[in-house]
Image (cartoon, grey):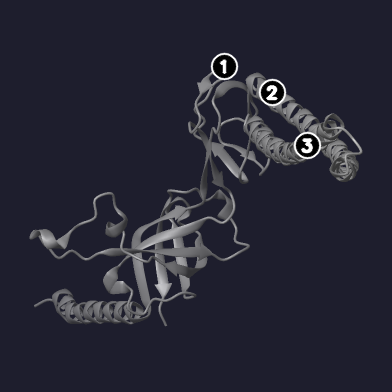
Amino acid sequence: MSSKEKSKSKLMPIILILIVLTSIGYGVSKYIYSLHHEDTDDAQIDADISPVLCRVTGYVQEINFEDNALIKKGDTLIKLDDRDLSIKVAQANAAIQNADAGISIAQATVGTAQSNVSVMQSGIENARVRLWKATQDFNRYDHLLKTKSITEVQFDATKAEKESDEVALLIANNQLQVSQKQVIAAQQQIASAQAQKVQRSADLNYANLQLSYATIVAPASGRASKKNIQLGQLVNAGSPLCVIVSNEGVFVMANFKETQLDKMKEGQHAEIIVDAFSENKFSGKVYRLSAATGAKFSLLPPDNATGNFVKVVQRVPVKIKFDENQQLINNLRPGMSVKVSVTID
């Protein structure tokens, strides 16, 4: 055997030992790492996405943004033709003026009815005085008739006058009751006119609200995307116009296996690697664990009672928030794939 072959034979055991030691070391390090970390690559960047919907039907008159442009909350995005809505506001204002006139008329009617009551009360007092005088005359004539001092014709005239005054007093009392009822009815007309004004005021508020919907403003700050309208287009109430992707508060939605959640809890540190920026590592914290598995929130959740049960490891969405003041965080976009490692110490 040559010296070269002898040296090779001596190196082979050393190389095998190094390989075995390296494998053992790698396996031990992985085992120790697994005791303190839970990893998943079933995760992506997410953010608040606000849909912008049309609340009234109308024709698009102005579009004040470009697709994927940065906008601020409250910026005017779209204006609709509001001429028909302005006419409805004018009609509602006219209805309120009409209701005010109705209240004035009802109040005047109450005043007239109350004056009539006062007149009727005066008439009753006058009728009572006349009846008192007629009664006194009747009593005197009745005494004189018994002494034959007057004729029966004179007595009958006095009696007729007394009965006539009694009827007049009864009529006056009835007319007073009628006038009092007219006052009550007029007061009810005031209440009805006031209720009518309240309704017309509500109509005006609704018309103004509908008019305000013709100016569509940004509900949040971010990037306006998915624009699907054009000038002059007729849009119906409820039609989606665009979406606003928030440029603040992006977070990670990581889907961990249910077997990984034993020691996971809120506040634990997380290390995030975004595929688009693989050379940079982001830090964050576990914010919330979902109340149910992702399968339960699906359109057709599985029903294990149907007899087709196959045990599948479920995944639970875990929301992870980024730590503040990190570079490149403003470059993250919802939907980007990430890898997440949560320290479970």
Up the image or down, 171 lies above or below 325; here it is above
User: Where residue 295 is drawn, which disc sits there?
Assistant: none
Up the image or down, 301 lies above or below 121; here it is below
Identify which residue is drawn at 51% across, 67% down. Answer: 284
Identify which residue is drawn at 63% across, 46% down. Answer: 221
| Residue tagged 3 | 163
Instruction: Report the side of 66 relative to 192 (left or right).
Output: left
Identify which residue is drawn at 90% across, 44% down. Answer: 140
Report the front residue among 321 and 209.
209
Dot 2: what SS?
A: helix
Q: Quadrant of residue 132?
A: top right
| Residue tagged 1 | 232
- Which residue extends farthest front? 148
Residue 275 horizontal/vertical position (percent) = 42, 53
Do labels 3 and 1 touch, CB within 8 Å?
Answer: no
Report the front residue among 288 and 166.
166
| Residue tagged 2 | 91
In the image, what residue type sits under mark 2?
Gln
Q: Quadrant of residue 222?
A: top right
Residue 205 horizontal/vertical position (percent) = 68, 36
Number of marks: 3
In the image, what residue type sits under mark 3?
Glu
Instruction: Report the side of 311 relative to 185 (left or right).
Output: left
In the image, what residue type sits under mark 1?
Gly
